[in-house]
Amino acid sequence: MERRRTVWGKLVAVLVVLSVCASMASGGCRSQETKEKNSIRVGVSLYRGDDTFINNIRSELENQAKEYEKETGIKVKLDILDAKGNQNTQNNQVERFLSLGCDVVCINPVDRMVASGMIDKAMAAGIPVVFFNRQPVEEDMNRWDQLYYVGADAKESAVLEGQILVDLYRENPGALDVNGDGVVSYVMLEGESSHQDSLIRTEWSIQTLKDGGVPIEKITGGIANWERSQASAIVEQWLKDYQDTIELIISNNDDMALGAIDAIERAGVVQKINLVGIDATTPGLDAVQSGKMLGTVSSDKEKYAWAIMQIAAAKALGREIPEEIPLESGKYYWCGQQIIQKKQ
Ligand code: GAL
């Protein structure tokens, strides 16, 4: 009896081993593995690691990856690379992520107009992509149902930025029309010309002022590519060219507004110049809190990074994207935004 049981036991063990091997050979092991994955590998390529807003998103992504691990027990191997503003570098980084076996790739494109090359590679490897912040053209986004985009709506940012000024003007016109001549004379600092946010933010901040009944007059405008140092140099020149006439600086983002503040402080300008920005970056929030900037617009960075991580993880695990992430046209997630002003 004892001996028969041992023989049966051995036979069962052999059958189990055989069936496991057969399923491995047929590729069945892969689906088994996907079902029970306890770690995922996520490759992230940033257009520029030295961009303040992107840097804030990066830190949040790292936090969100840890949160995800804590909540689910699934390990997240997050590889974040900086493309340093070079599309070729980014193409190589993406190729490397794909060949290293990443389960999903998150891309903040250097040149959003040429995302198709990276999409081709991802499609060939069957690896989903979550783009963020720099929106590929619709035609590219529609090439595959495994492409997603996370961002903040540019028109919404601009309307909120304009609203800060409309509210202030309604409360006290003299706070904006500093010299009391009946018009608010402004200059505009713009981001990269190829970025979807620049044109739309420029247009809608002004439209909101007009719709809100603020009498405005443009003195001049310039492109400072989101950069503090470029904005600082441009504004330094404007302060010389348009002495004492600038009452308001509208900036497409906080970093350029901060550059303008640097120039104003360097030049020792004494008359009041109001400034508004967008992003609510860490230094941007400091400038609002210290009264150097009238206000900014925050796209909830925690939620932004949370959405990227949730979509990426769901795709990596072969799961449905959670219902708490409403996707427009099945692929776009728009992060909510709000006005930030000095806490009283
Ligand atoms: C914008 C942001 C800018 C800059 C840019 C980079 O949305 O406001 O500060 O980070 O993205 O693509």
Image: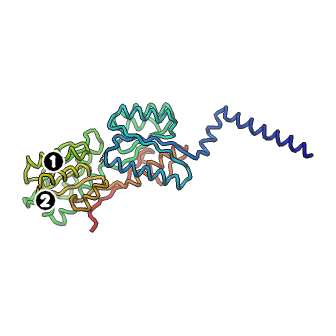
Q: Amino acid at mark 2?
A: Lys
Measuring 40% from the left and 50% from the top, which residue is drawn there? 59
Callout 2: SS:
loop
Label 2 CA crowd tier, 10 Å (few <14, some 14–19, many 20+): some
Q: Is residue 318 left or right of residue 50?
A: right
Q: Amino acid at mark 1?
A: Val
Which residue, as the protein is rendered here, is positioned at the far bottom?
Answer: 344
Q: Is residue 7 left or right of residue 91?
A: right
Horizontal and vertical percent position of residue 211: 21, 55
Q: Is residue 301 left or right of residue 178?
A: right
Q: CA distance from mark 1 to mark 2?
A: 15 Å
Q: Earlier in the sequence, mark 1 or mark 2?
A: 1
In the image, residue 300 above or below residue 320: below
Question: Depth check: 115 or 324 in front?
Answer: 115
In the picture, the disc for residue 199 is none
Measuring 22% from the left and 45% from the top, which residue is drawn there? 229
In the image, residue 185 above or below residue 21: below
Question: Circle 1 sits on which residue?
Answer: 235
Label 1 CA crowd tier, 10 Å (few <14, some 14–19, many 20+): many
Residue 137 shows in the view: no
Question: Circle 2 sits on which residue?
Answer: 272
Horizontal and vertical percent position of residue 271: 10, 59
Horizontal and vertical percent position of residue 117: 40, 31
Callout 1: SS:
helix
Q: Is residue 229 left or right of residue 36?
A: left
Q: Is mark 2 within 8 Å of ligand 1?
A: no
Question: Depth check: 295 or 8 in front?
Answer: 8
Measuring 51% from the left and 42% from the top, which residue is drawn there? 41
Residue 334 shows in the view: yes
